Image (cartoon, rainbow, N blue to C red):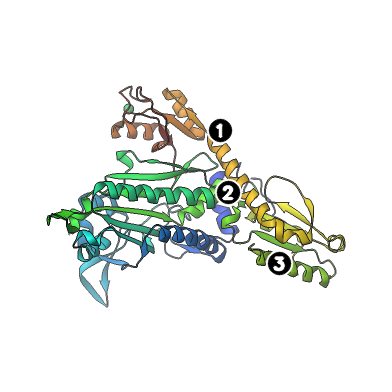
Amino acid sequence: MARDERGVTAQSEDFAAWYNEVVFKAGLVDRGPAKGTMVIRPYGYRLWELLQSELDRRIKDTGHENAYFPLLIPESYLGREAEHVEGFSPELAVVTHAGGKMLEEPLVVRPTSETIIGEMMAKWISSHRDLPLLLNQWANVVRWELRPRMFLRTTEFLWQEGHTAHADEAAARRETMLALDIYHEVARELAAMPVVPGEKTPGERFAGAVATYTIEGMMRDGRALQSGTSHYMGTNFASAFDIRYTGEADREELCHTTSWGMSTRMIGGIVMTHGDDKGLVFPPRLAPHQVVIVPITRGGNVGVEDAANDLARRLRSAGVRAHVDARPQLTPGFKYNEWEMRGVPIRLELGPRDLEAGTVMMVRRLGDGKQAVPIDSLPETMPGVLDDFQAFLLARATAFRDSHTRTVDNREAFADAVSTGWGLALHCGSSTCEEEIKSLTAATPRCVPLGGEPETGVCVRCGAASAYGKRVIFGRAY
Ligand SMILES: [Zn+2]
């Protein structure tokens, strides 16, 4: 295995090994003592906070309010919606003992909160004047994972879950699409992930939903990552939890509900969308440090370190997240490698001769080479440099996605396309056919893209008439 001096397996040699090494070595995460749990370390948590604050602002700007519901849910609640309990049962953690004795009714550690929020919605909604009810919760959830992978599948993870109730189907469907739009924007604009928004096929729907929408990202190994989902529940949960309102004609009506979530899985998505052989590459808008300044102080040149600290202060005043790596015991070369591996977008190298010339050496994590720039211009120019790097990452990821997506019309071309990326295929919509495809190629239908061109024809696998009036994205997925 090719390893650099920080000991990361090259991504191009073994993608899975690269991922598993880089998330630990970059200081994003550590393993928790209970199987499948993760400790999010400060460097990873800062990234999450930056994503979270931007997502939270958009959720509030669209009229939703944050609330908090209990972690423990009576087990019987899950059983009230038949598909919901069937979907989640294998992943549930259940508390049977507490306070030194056996509980009369076991308590489920929430895998998601439709049931407990549904119970409260029923209590809070009585007339059409109480609608829409637009709630969001930031929380942890627990889903028992037999094959955990850090950030992608862990027994406990962090997320937000939006839960809303509406008077009719049209309003609830508008809400479902609004949440999907927010996710699409956050993924594109902040994470520089060119995700594709679309609808899940019936076999891939959320347990209890009438319709599930998703944003699907392509990782650099060609696999898909479901990066956020939004569900229209119809009246399924309203029936199960008796969420009703009195309409204008004094008639009792069932509410139409939605739910939608984005999680710490996004961190794994960012890692796998932008990383390379050297390690992480963070999009500036979510990078904990956008700029790292490395003072080159051979023989303890105090002036250089002072100048580095002064530059960092001026960059911070200009709204740039700048960090000075003044650790005395490490060489500049070691620091360069380490910050490259940890994905910092811009590195500034400042030595005595640079300082004399009034310049600093600027190095982008990807793309253009080294470049000497005047120190005094940096507070003004750096925001633009970071915007350009952000745009470069989105363009690079978009080009990668497009060059790994192929339109396919027969079984051989299909198998070939999904071995390295995505196949756009016509499909009959039958779940038996989906399962056959999965067992033969490991690919699943990721979504029916919202933007797809209308097209009819026959299923790529079985030859029956296609069901969606357009092509479906198939790919192997995380
Ligand atoms: Zn078929």
In the picture, the disc for residue 36 is none
The answer for how far apart the CA atoms under marks 1 and 3 are is 41 Å
Q: Dot 2, crowdedness within 10 Å: few (<14), some or many (≥20)?
A: many
User: Where is residue 119 drawn, in percent x and y?
Assistant: 22, 63
Residue 4 shown left or right of residue 417 in the figure: right
Q: Nearer the viewer, mark 2 or mark 3?
A: 3
Q: Secondary structure at mark 2?
A: helix
Residue 317 shown left or right of residue 144 in the figure: right
Kindly indicate whether the residue at mark 3 contacts the one at mark 1 (C-beta within 8 angstroms): no
- Upstream in sequence: badge 1 or badge 2: 2
Q: Secondary structure at mark 3?
A: helix
Residue 247 shown left or right of residue 10 in the figure: left
Q: Is residue 147 above or below residue 428?
A: below
Q: Is mark 3 within 8 Å of ligand 1?
A: no
Q: Quadrant of ligand 1?
A: top left
User: Where is residue 229 drawn, in percent x and y?
Assistant: 38, 49
In the picture, the disc for residue 403 is 1
In the picture, the disc for residue 314 is 3
Q: Amino acid at mark 3?
A: Arg
Q: Nearer the viewer, mark 1 or mark 3?
A: 3
- Upstream in sequence: badge 2 or badge 3: 2
Quarter of the image with the N terminus in it = top right
Quickly name the residue at label 2.
18
**Residue located 22% across and 71% down the image:** 103
Q: Dot 3, crowdedness within 10 Å: few (<14), some or many (≥20)?
A: some
Q: Amino acid at mark 2?
A: Trp
**Residue located 71% across and 61% down the image:** 379
Q: Is mark 2 within 8 Å of ligand 1?
A: no
